[in-house]
Amino acid sequence: MRTTVGWQADDEGGLRRVAIERRELRADDVAVRVDYCGVCHTDLHALRSHTGGPLVPGHEFTGVVTEVGSAVTRFAAGAAVAVGNIVDSCGACAMCRRGQENFCYEFPTLTYGGTDRHDGSTTLGGYSREYVVREGFAYPLPAGLDPAAAAPLLCAGVTVWEPLRALKAGPGRRVAVAGLGGLGHLAVKFAVALGAETTVISRTPDKAEDARRLGAHELLVSTDEAQLEAARDRFDVVIDTIAVPHELGPYLRLVALDGTLSQVGYLGPVTVETMDLLAGRKNLGSAGSGGRPATAEMLEFCAGHGIAADIELLPSARVHEALDRLGRNDVRYRFVLDLSDLPAR
């Protein structure tokens, strides 16, 4: 086994720096020196619900290939790469054959907390200095993308990219983004770059300046009933990135005839009034992560349009500060850990 250093969950709900094991390279593996890893709400949830067993969070990271397996053809040592929250899938089901490994019928292997499809071991994530991954689930990091600001694209970015593309966001389409956080700010950047008329929906007007800076045409205050009524049946697409339980009715009423509310923030149980769907033939959908083709397409689009996450970069030794502030929503808009303060071995 290979040994590296990472931040592993302890019994007190925190993280401690420890030596962790990585597998020896299989024929189609690449070893990646992890340079930057985004801090996702999923990491916070995983730590809060941790009840035992090895847990190393982190599933959106960039780095450099240091070694390749004997059958690897897409990468060589020194290549800049990005890795997201899926590191394997069955490769044979209908979804995988369509390039939607994120919807694999056997469930995809997650970057951490997953089960390796070959040896049954638990996958350990990117809060570490090295990761070993199948070459098919590593992506070339296009030149021109800042590797630190690009890391959140591999989870937050592709999570909103897929539904925006599937729902044909672009010129002549009106898109609203509910919630201006880690996912939401990237959804705004994508929708604007795709050519859609873009609106931010927020509980208060505090983020109006940020919305304009990101390219949005306006900000709609969700607590202002007059504004909501004026915007009724207006948007072809509403991307709901709100991460806490909330009523969907007010957002469905903003959706235009035959439009869609895509809920990608809160993934728990919801209640929907049928009349909110019926009146206007409205659609309620969702999405999660991204398949390999969409992820590669998103990275190229970002490079071509100068899109990356708005981040606050911290040394990995300040990971507890990042998690604490994330829990208080004290970040605009994504924390990224610099792993260079960890030794490789």
Image (cartoon, rainbow, N blue to C red):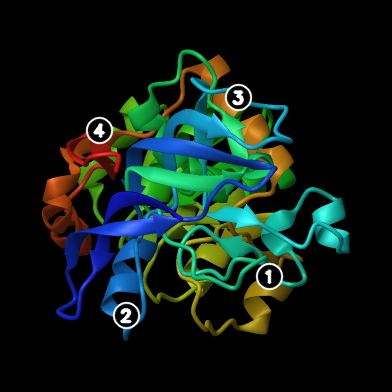
The answer to whether any part of residue 271 appears in the image is yes
Quarter of the figure with the C terminus: top left
Where does residue 259 sit, x and y in percent of width and height? Answer: 70, 55
4 and 3 marks in contact (CB < 8 Å): no
Q: Earlier in the sequence, mark 4 or mark 3?
A: 4
Q: Earlier in the sequence, mark 1 or mark 2?
A: 2
Q: From the image, tell me which residue sits under label 4.
A: 209
Residue type pointed to by label 4: Glu
Gap in Å between the C-alphas at discs 1 and 2? 21 Å
1 and 4 marks in contact (CB < 8 Å): no
Q: From the image, tell me which residue sits under label 2.
A: 50
Q: Earlier in the sequence, mark 2 or mark 4?
A: 2
Where does residue 25 sit, x and y in percent of width and height? Answer: 58, 46
Q: From the image, tell me which residue sits under label 1.
A: 107
In the image, which disc is placed on residue 301?
3
267 above or below 295?
A: below
